[in-house]
Amino acid sequence: MADIRADAVAVYVYRKALSGLEFLQLKRSESTGEYAHSWQICYGGIQPGETAVQAARRELSEETGLVPIRMFQADTLESFYFRPRDYVMVMPVFAVEVAADAVLMLNNEHTACRWIPAQQAPEAFMWRSQREAVRIIQEQLTDPTGGMQFMEIAL
C-alpha cells in the first residue's frame, strides 16, 4: 500500500507585469533525479521543526534568491501519486508575489527560469494540479468576499 506524505510545500511565485500576472517556472537540473529537465514551480521539503510557511520562505530563498513582497496561503492543496517512490504526496500551496524587476539567482537544482503569462498557464504547466493552483491563486487575488484577509501571511 502506498504511503501518504505531507512533508513538502508548493510555492507559486508571481509578479505583476504591465500585461498582467506572470508565474515563475524553473527548469529542473539533471541532479534533481525525477522529472529532470521539466519546467516546474518552487517545490521543497519541510525540515524537522519547521512549519510549512517557514519551509516555503526558505525554499524560495534557496532556489531563487527572491524576496517576497506579499505571501498568502492558496485555497487549495496539491496532491498526486509519486510513482517512482510509491507514495501519495499532499502539499500546502503558497503564492508569493515578488517585485516586477526582481533578479533571480538559481541554485544547482535548476538550470533556467522563465515567466509565464497567467493566460498561458493551461499550456505551460504540465500537471493539472499546477494549472488549477494558478487559476485558484488568480481568483483569490480578485476575490471580493474579503476571504483573503485570512489567507495573507505576515512578512
Image: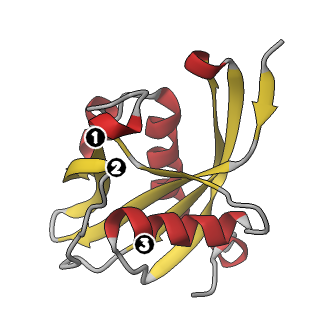
Question: Mark 3 or mark 1, which has the lower sequence index?
Answer: 1
Quickly name the residue at label 3. 61
> Up-down: is 31 above or below 97?
above
Q: Which amino acid, by three-letter code, is at mark 3?
A: Ser
Between tags 3 and 2, which lies in front? Answer: 2
Q: Residue 152's x, y, as percent?
A: 63, 76
Quickly name the residue at label 2. 109
Q: From the image, which quarter does the C terminus lie in?
A: bottom right
Question: Which residue occupies the extreme top position in the image?
Answer: 1
Total labels: the figure holds: 3
Residue nearer the viewer, 131 or 41: 41
Whether residue 56 sits left or right of residue 60 in the image: it is right
Badge 3 vs badge 1, beta-carbon distance below 8 Å: no
Residue nearer the viewer, 92 or 5: 5
Give the image quarter of residue 16. Answer: bottom left
Cα distance, mark 2 to mark 1? 5 Å
Q: Which amino acid, by three-letter code, is at mark 1?
A: Ser
Crowd rating for badge 1 (residues with CA inside 10 Å; few <14, some 14–19, many 20+): some
Quickly name the residue at label 1. 29
